Image (cartoon, grey):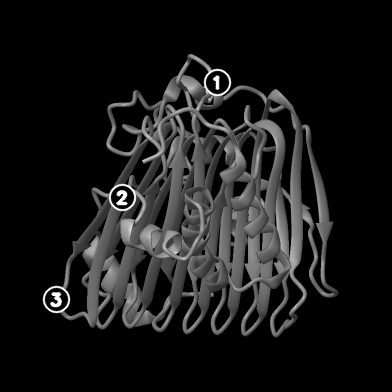
Amino acid sequence: MTLTDSVRDALEVEHVESHLNPPASYDLADHPVPTGREETWRFTPLKRLRGILDGEASDDCLTWTTSLPEGVTMPVISSSEAREQGALPPNERPAALAMELSGGCQVIDVPAEFSSDEPILVELHGDDAEALVWGELLVKVGRHARATLVLTHTGSSRYSAATSVVVEDGAELTMVTIQDWDDDAVHLGRDSIRVGRDASVKHAALSFGGDLVRIHTNVEYAGPGGSAELLGLYFADGDEGASGKGQHIEHRLFADHTAPRTRSHVSYKGALQGQGAHTVWVGNVLIRKAAEGIETFEENRNLVLTDGCQADSIPNLEIETGEIEGAGHASAIGRFDDEQLFYLRSRGIDEKEARRLVVHGFFNDLIRKIGVPAIEDKLVATVEAELSKNVSGKVI
């Protein structure tokens, strides 16, 4: 898959380096150890990463369980071969370390013209919270293929992964990543997506478990007409003890409109409860000079359920051309809607049940947008389990 001549020429002349996203490079030396003062790391509690940024050797103790439709293969290749086959360069240190130290790249290969309603199911499970595991994954979707991939993370580990997703011309991919770790896990992930000409990608990042989860999703376009829908759902809990170190869940996105007549739509929703719970959402969009006629919109909504927790939400737009169809963003952090609660309570529903119903309604429309029936019931049950937890802090 290659860029069209017109798009390539425009990008070669432009040479725009966005201040919203560090430059990508395969060279680990281009990704120094962060200090926490960098814009891209200022929200992340580095001390809780427990050595991931130091580049220790991998313990490689994740168990892979897979279910593949006929025609889909999962070979393992070297990292150098992965670059030749389209693995995208990392733009931050954890992903660069993963590419250098993983010892090989797991490939999910969807052939051209493939089409199936059966999802590709991959589960990674860890059994040791102190084990450090580096992972590299390359997802290749051939021309005019149609596929669904569900990648689930469970158990305990310190896991850092670099994932490249290459969707060729005219193809359609729905990709769901579920972070349902145990409470002591740490997960740093980078999903880099290249959308081909007239191709479409729906990417959903769903984060519930783990002590610290930081997912960085990047999208770029290899030709006109590409479309990306980026969805996210997260729920962070506080600490019932005296430490006040609740879950830290951080999602960063970068939509890089590198071709004309492309589209991106971002919709993330999160809830948090309990002392010390912290969520971060940063949505960055760059519209380059070559990207005329594009359309983009990003939104983030956060529901704060108790005192003692914090949500940060930062949308950014960087526009290099005025010849666009539309661009906008929205962000909100709030507590329960008093009118919704009053409506439910006026019909005989007690306050606890009314609050539960409001949260379910807050998430359910996004769960339906994901459009993967095989996981809808699981997601609803996971939200219910989060709501049933006893957390410290006053309900607001």
What's the amino acid at mark 1? Answer: Arg
Left or right for 293, reference 226: left
Establish if 396 lies above or below 246. Answer: below
Closer to us: mark 3 or mark 1? 1
From the image, tell me which residue sits under label 3: 322
Of the 4 image quadrants, the one containing the C terminus is top left
User: Label 3, label 1: how many angstroms apart (C-alpha)?
Assistant: 45 Å
Point 36% across, 33% down: residue: 307
- The residue tagged 1 is 50
What's the amino acid at mark 2?
Gly
Residue 356 % position (x, y)? 52, 53
From the viewer's perspective, is residue 292 above or below residue 210?
Answer: below
Residue 153 figure quarter:
top right
Circle 3 crowding by C-alpha within 10 Å: few under 14, some 14–19, many from 20: few
- Looking at the picture, which amino acid does disc 3 mark? Gly
First in residue order: circle 2 vs circle 3: 3
Q: Looking at this view, is 9 or 116 the one in front? A: 116
User: Alpha-carbon neighbours of circle 2 within 10 Å: few (<14), some, or many (≥20)?
Assistant: few
Q: Which mark is residue 334?
A: 2
The residue mark sitting in front, 2 or 1, is 2
Query: Considering depth in this image, is 25 or 20 the residue closer to the camera?
Result: 20
Point 31% across, 72% down: residue: 296
- Residue 332: image location, x then y, percent: 28, 55
Kindly check if marks 2 and 1 are in contact, taking CB atoms under 8 A apart as contact.
no
Helix, strand or loop under label 1: loop
